[in-house]
Image (cartoon, helix red, strand yellow):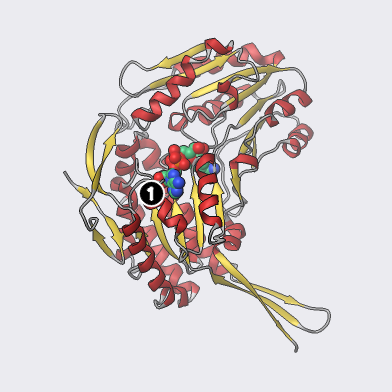
């Protein structure tokens, strides 16, 4: 079986003792490749390579244009290898190929282009002072960045972290999720082909706790940790990072509220609400998993929402016609099904959905009548499960939406402009989408409040995290 290697210091390599684990295709439920299994030792080797490339190599010392040209070349190569990269993520996690080909991989290429250009264009900040002094800011690279990624948008979220880190002159050790190692190894190979010096982008595979992930977070030679994953993992990483005072940036779990007012355009609201919860089989941090619908349109919305959910086409994720793949792993399937099994006991009803006909499929599921205390309304399920609840007033809707420890994002559907602004301001969330979902401007801050994260990334927010801004003040 083919081996997915680590990439350390410009070399594709197995682990020194040749430890391996299997990566499983959740559609066939069979292992499809072996993966080099890293631990303390491999994490140490990767950090040593990244440290040397930072302390002695050309990357942090290059001009923005030269570094940017390499990142643009890498983006070209990502586009040229679209099929292979898309198939890697689809095989590893069961995401429909139309998503990986049509969205994730193109966006990964764009991440490199955007941050390469953004760094070049925002590298200077001059502050002429009234006193006649002149101050300016140097955005110096922070050093070695450990990037720890989840499995739900493998390549897209990895590039969201490493593109700004690299554009600002850092070197990187990337640890992809153990469920989705394949695209990261391909990316590291393409980076070398694009002309990135060895040691600038390293990839090590393995698990989190007691494994390569934890080792990276405890290594004092790491200068920044950027992590996307579960809130509980964020807590563990924060406490490991605290020992070395390593700055962290966390994008964590979510339980997004989606508010549909009676004055909404219902066609729009239904179609975006379907995308918001059933894309990627609901395995999306930003999923609109809590739907609150104003009572006047509740029944009509529910009928149309259920019909649209039932019309989604499940199938082989490699088939371009498939809209809904299996869940990403046996373990995750068991977790999602446990939530559904608990619905009746908590007073809720399943209006449509439940276990799929075969394998790790869960049908698009709509839960109604769940009380505010029900686990399906409070906890992140990370599956194709929407909980729909009626409300009467705007204040009640905002209070219900904010009744969560999470605060990643929310959606508002209304044709009333004042209400759109008022409710957007009142919602406790890092992003509010009005009459749309998932539309991103990479200059905008991205992150969450409460249990959904720490810090923001995107545009200048990424610059703040991945650099050490230095003030230089001169008497003129
Ligand atoms: P996870 O926390 O289980 O794992 C994420 C990564 O952390 C993996 O690479 C894992 O190996 C590693 N890890 C686990 N424990 C670790 C430890 N103690 N030290 C170091 N590394 C460790 O998350 P997941 O199941 O892969 O992803 C799903 C979660 O990610 C959901 O909660 C989802 O909401 C969240 N997520 C958030 C965003 C966002 O932008 N806010 C985006 C995508 C996913």
Image position, residue 405 (x, y; %): 64, 34
Residue hosting label 1? 176
Secondary structure state at the residue bearing disc 1? loop
Image position, residue 336 (x, y; %): 44, 24
* Residue 313 seen from this side: yes
Q: Is residue 420 above or below residue 19?
A: above
* Residue 200 seen from this side: no
Q: Which of 411 and 398 is in front in this view?
A: 398
Q: Nearer the viewer, residue 455 or 19?
A: 19
Residue at image coords 41%, 70%: 51
Residue furthest out toward the right:
130
User: Which quadrant is home to the N terminus?
Assistant: top left
Q: Which of 285 and 424 is in front in this view?
A: 285
Image position, residue 288 (x, y; %): 57, 30
Q: Is residue 205 above or below residue 437?
A: below
Residue at image coords 74%, 28%: 399
**Pointer 1 residue Cβ closer than 8 Å to ligand 1:** yes
Image position, residue 284 (x, y; %): 49, 35
The answer to which quarter of the image holds residue 325 is top left
Number of labels in the image equals 1
54 sits left or right of 140 in the view? left
User: Which quadrant is home to the C terminus?
Assistant: bottom right
Q: In this view, does 258 lie above or below 119?
A: above
The answer to which quarter of the image holds residue 221 is bottom left
Q: How crowded is mark 1: few (under 14 residues within 10 Å), some or many (20 or more)?
A: many
53 sits left or right of 349 in the view? left
Residue furthest out toward the left:
1
Q: In this view, does 417 lie above or below 293?
A: below
């Amino acid at each position: 079986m083919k081996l997915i290697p680590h990439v350390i210091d410009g070399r594709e390599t197995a682990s020194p003792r040749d430890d391996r684990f299997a990566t499983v295709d959740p559609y066939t439920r069979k292992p499809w490749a072996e993966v080099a299994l890293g631990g303390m030792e491999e994490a140490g080797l990767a950090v040593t390579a990244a440290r040397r490339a930072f302390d002695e190599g050309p990357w942090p010392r290059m001009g923005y244009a030269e570094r940017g040209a390499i990142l643009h070349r890498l983006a070209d190569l990502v586009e040229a290898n679209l099929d292979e990269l898309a198939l890697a993520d689809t095989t590893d996690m069961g995401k429909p190929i139309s998503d990986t080909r049509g969205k994730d991989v193109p966006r990964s290429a764009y991440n490199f282009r955007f941050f390469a250009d953004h760094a070049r264009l925002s590298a200077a900040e001059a502050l002429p002072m009234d006193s006649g002094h002149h101050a300016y800011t140097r955005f110096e690279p922070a050093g070695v960045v450990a990037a720890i990624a989840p499995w739900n948008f493998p390549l897209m979220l990895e590039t969201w972290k490493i593109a700004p880190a690299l554009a600002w002159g850092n070197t990187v050790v990337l640890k992809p999720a153990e469920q989705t190692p394949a695209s990261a190894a391909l990316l590291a190979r393409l980076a070398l082909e694009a002309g990135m010096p060895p040691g600038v982008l390293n990839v090590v595979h393995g698990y989190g706790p007691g494994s390569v992930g934890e080792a990276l977070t405890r290594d004092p030679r790491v200068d920044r940790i950027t992590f996307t994953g579960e809130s509980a993992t964020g807590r563990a990483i924060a406490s490991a990072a605290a020992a070395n005072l390593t700055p962290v940036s966390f994008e964590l779990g979510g339980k997004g509220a989606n508010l549909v007012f009676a004055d909404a355009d219902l066609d729009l609201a239904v179609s975006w609400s379907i995308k918001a919860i059933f894309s990627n089989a609901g395995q999306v941090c930003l999923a609109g998993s809590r739907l609150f619908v104003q009572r006047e349109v509740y029944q009509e919305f529910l009928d149309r929402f259920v019909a649209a959910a039932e019309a989604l086409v499940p199938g082989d994720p490699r088939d371009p016609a498939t809209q809904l793949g299996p869940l990403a792993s046996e373990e995750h399937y068991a977790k999602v099904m446990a939530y559904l099994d608990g619905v009746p006991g908590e007073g809720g009803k399943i209006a449509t959905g439940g276990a799929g006909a075969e394998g790790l499929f869960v049908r698009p599921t709509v839960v109604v009548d769940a009380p505010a205390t029900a686990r399906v309304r409070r906890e992140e399920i990370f599956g194709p499960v929407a909980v729909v609840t009626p409300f009467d007033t705007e204040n009640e809707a905002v209070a219900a939406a904010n009744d969560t420890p999470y605060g990643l994002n929310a959606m508002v559907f209304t044709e009333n402009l004042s209400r759109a602004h008022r409710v957007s301001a009142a919602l406790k969330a890092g992003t509010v989408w009005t009459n749309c979902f998932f539309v991103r401007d990479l200059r905008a801050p991205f992150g969450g409040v409460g249990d959904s994260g720490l810090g923001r990334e995107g545009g200048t927010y990424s610059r703040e995290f991945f650099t050490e801004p230095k003030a230089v003040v001169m008497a003129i």
